[in-house]
Amino acid sequence: MNSTTTAAAPAQLLRRLAACFYDSLLLAALWMVAAALWLPFTGGEAVPARLYPLFQLYLAIVAVTFFVGFWCRAGRTLGMQAWHLRVQQPDGNLITYKQGLIRCAVALVSWAAFGLGFLWMLVDRERRTWHDIASGTQVVRIPPPRRRPLP
């Protein structure tokens, strides 16, 4: 447990959305690499209609692995790191894989509901989104790392 992260302030909506935007760019690049790895299975052609559901599932697994992996192993994605955010349990510990999967699934619902799951934090006293509530997690702002003075 890290006392500096447990006492940290909840992340604000715009900061969270900015991190989401960064992560969407990274995910798009990752999907391009994943799609290129799929090409040998299609003879270098576009994914045939009969395989398209399987291809979509493959890309979904890539996305879930990206988010859940970063959240559970580092407490933040690269976008969250850039915006000094961390996802954690209320006691400051890293989230579990179960929490990460719940968080990922409910975040999808939050977006599908025209972003209402994210906007919920504007009325929640603890500034939690639907996926924070469902997974028992929180996103907090952490201070940027101190820079060492140049020698």
Image (cartoon, rainbow, N blue to C red):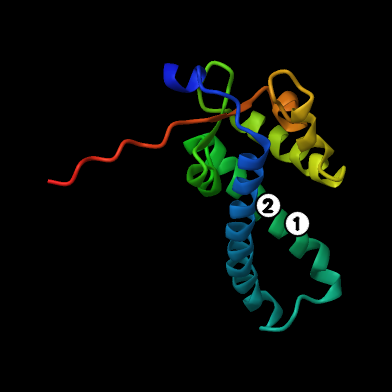
Residue 124, given in percent of the width and then of the height, sits at 76, 22
Please state which amino acid type lies under the numbered disc 2.
Ile
Count residues near mark 2 (Cα–Cα under 10 Å), then give few for <14, some for 14-19, many for 20+. Answer: few
Query: In what element is the residue under mark 1?
Result: helix
Q: In this rendering, is residue 106 above or below 82? A: above
Could you tell me which residue is drawn at 72 percent across and 54 percent down? 60
Instruction: Give the residue drawn at x 60%, y 33%.
Output: 97
Q: Are marks 1 and 2 in contact (CB under 8 Å)?
A: yes
Q: Amino acid at mark 1?
A: Leu
Residue occupying the point 54% across, 16% down: 91
Whole-percent x, y for residue 25 in the image? 61, 60
Which residue is identified by label 1? 57
Where in the figure is residue 75, as x and y percent of width and height?
Answer: 51, 34
Gap in Å between the C-alphas at discs 1 and 2?
6 Å
Q: Which residue is mark 2?
A: 61
**In the image, is 90 to the left or to the right of 129?**
left
Above or below, 21 against 4 in this view is below
Residue at the left extreme of this rendering: 151
151 is higher (above) or lower (below) than 36: above
Of residues 12 and 33, the one nearer the viewer is 12
Q: Is residue 2 visible?
A: no
